[in-house]
Image (spheres, grey):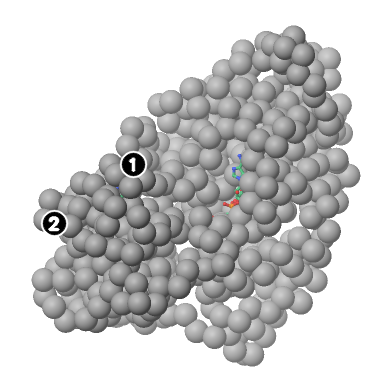
Amino acid sequence: MSSTQQDRRQAGAEELITDLDAVIVGAGFAGLYALHKLRDEMGLSARIFEAGDGVGGTWYWNRYPGARSDSSSWIYCYSFDEELREEWQWSERYPGQQEMLGYLEHVAEKFDLNRDIQFGTRVTEATFDEETNRWEVRTDAGDVVSARFLVAALGALSAANVPDIPGLETFAGDRYHTAEWPKEGVDFTGERVGVIGTGATGIQVATEIAEQADHLTVFQRTANYALPAGNHPMDAELERWYKENYDEIWESVRHNFSGHDYDPIGKVALEATPEERERAFQERWERGGFGLWLGNYDDILESREANDTVSEWVRQKIWERVDDPVTAEKLTPRDHAFGTKRVPLEMGYYEIFNRDNVELVDVQKAPIEEITPTGVRTKHGEYEFDVLVFATGFDAMTGPYNKIDIRGRDGQLLRDKWAEGPRTYLGLTSAGYPNLFAITGPQSPSVLTNMPVAIEQHVEWISGLIRHMRDNGLAVVEPTSEAEDDWVDHSQEVAHTTLFPQSATWYMGANIPGKPQVFLPYLGGLGGYRQKCDEVAANGYEGFAFADREGSNA
Ligand code: FAD
Ligand code: NA7
């Protein structure tokens, strides 16, 4: 018995321990598929704990106006069930939040998942008991569950970041974070609104609020290279095309770099003529979406010189759309290379700055000093608001793990082990934390992909490993320290062959004060990563150590 368990039992705490094969944390895309896989396909007893009051994860929490997928609907979904993909009809190229939530609710209902999900319950502690080789999981609702396997489907972008600005609590108006948006919505009519943040979310929400509010002030710390989304309603022909070609489309996205439907040009920008480049960029711009980012020349994200060609081209496009040259210049990114920060997709964002009721405040040179009861004060003065919207992003990837006391062997807290940055093998497992699996965790392709494709790969690989254990009478699996060290080094090496680590982004942990600055997702590409995971499995789960139920090494 671990010391924490002993302490509690000595203290006489009454506990009702439920025994399960698997506890899954989170009911977004990842948790829902994990439950279906483990429970319905493998016959394990499993339960999800979910902090929200319903399924959907990202699409449950991010209900802000303008919230919309940036992935094409026909691949921003599951592929595992033929009937599901045939029966579901998307209404747009990029579905909005309500449609996404509706889809995930439909999935939960179709596969009868809700009966094994405990909503409104946050997992606060998970301790590996070295005597029993089981996880003891505790929640804020007082549950204590013992499980052989712990599946962390926590979401890479689920820990909202509210910056610690002095005076935050003194604001007398209404204050919202986009990732904790009230279900009943917010009416901005007649209000003076401040939006802090101009990432993918800030750009979506500001575009909508500009239409409604009396006055909107956008606080921008870093100008972004936003690309036109090119959203459009679904038409019958497109729907027929993707349903008829589903298998080929999915075969391609499963094995390409990003899990998105953009094909790289297959040449380097610096060998193309300026006219060829202009044509290639313009074509991708007109098609909308991430084409300029993920379907461009091969050297765009590796060579600064090549990157300059596209960075400058996008800057010109921003200038063409904004009337006031001072505002246009403020909106023009000059401090980082195109594509090294998460590229936002926009639907009329730049044009909101041509409206009389919208103002842009650059807080890079004059940072926000204080939130006051009536608004926001920077070095240049005070701005008064009725409503403040924080579009300030997330403590990405490691944040949701650090919020749980996850204790592995010798009681070591995962957050202590990861104090200098995450340490994983394949982004799926961590040495000293047996039978704990992360879905789209740090050092896996995760946020650099169209995520449902990465999620399906993870869930299927994890269930394959569990099946292997069952077939061979094995109870415990964990990676060796050597395999983990190699993966951490490889993951950093790959990142540093690109321009990504040169920019201060949430990929690097740079948005959270004090967070270690290491590149968080794996940049080797989803296809290559899938191949590596398959090879590991084919080689008898190379890099992993197993033990049987009695703890003997196998
Ligand atoms: P989530 O959907 O984040 O679900 C995780 C769940 O775990 C949450 O519901 C959370 O409440 C729960 N949870 C976490 N910790 C605990 C705990 N301790 N106890 C209990 N419950 C817990 N990706 C794309 O590929 N394409 C897109 O277009 C795209 N658009 C996005 C737009 C927005 C606004 C955001 C925020 C993200 C977007 N993403 C997009 C990323 C998105 O997060 C993933 O696509 C996908 O939804 C992740 O699913 P998930 O199940 O892994 O995580
Ligand atoms: P992001 O991309 O992290 O954007 C957050 C924005 O908030 C960004 O512009 C930040 O500026 C800004 N920010 C954060 N803290 C501050 C403070 N203290 N002062 C001023 N401005 C601040 O999060 P998003 O939600 O937009 O996008 C994340 C993902 O979720 C993305 O993949 C989407 O799919 C949805 P910075 O750039 O750090 O200078």
Q: Position of residue 154 (x, y in %)?
A: 60, 44
Residue 11 position (above or below residue 264)? above
Q: Position of residue 530 (x, y in %)?
A: 60, 48
Question: Where's the C terminus, which quadrant?
Answer: top right
Q: Earlier in the sequence, mark 1 or mark 2?
A: 1
Element type at marker 1?
A: loop
Q: Which mark is residue 381?
A: 2
User: Which dot, 1 or 2, sits closer to the camera?
Assistant: 2
The one nearer the camera, 500 or 278, is: 500
Q: Badge 1 is on which residue?
A: 164
Which class describes the residues within 10 Å of circle 1: few (<14), some (14-19), or many (20+)?
A: few
Q: Which mark is residue 321?
A: none
- Ligand 2 resides in the quarter of the picture at bottom left
Q: Using the rendered view, name the quadrant where residue 202 is placed.
A: bottom left
Residue at x 40% of width, y 68% of height:
205
Residue 321 can be seen in this image: no
539 vs 70, left or right, is right
Residue at x 56% of width, y 80% of height:
92
Q: Position of residue 173 (x, y in %)?
A: 36, 59
Which class describes the residues within 10 Å of circle 2: few (<14), some (14-19), or many (20+)?
A: few
Amino acid type of the residue tagged 1 in the rendering: Asp
544 vs 340, left or right, is right
Label total for image? 2
Question: Where's the N terminus, which quadrant?
Answer: top right
228 vs 547, left or right, is left
Q: CA distance from mark 1 to mark 2?
A: 20 Å
Q: Using the rendered view, name the quadrant where residue 434 is placed.
A: top right
The one nearer the camera, 525 or 200, is: 200
The answer to whether mark 1 and mark 2 are in CB contact below 8 A is no
Element type at marker 2?
A: strand
Residue at x 36% of width, y 80% of height:
211
Residue at x 29% of width, y 63% of height:
385
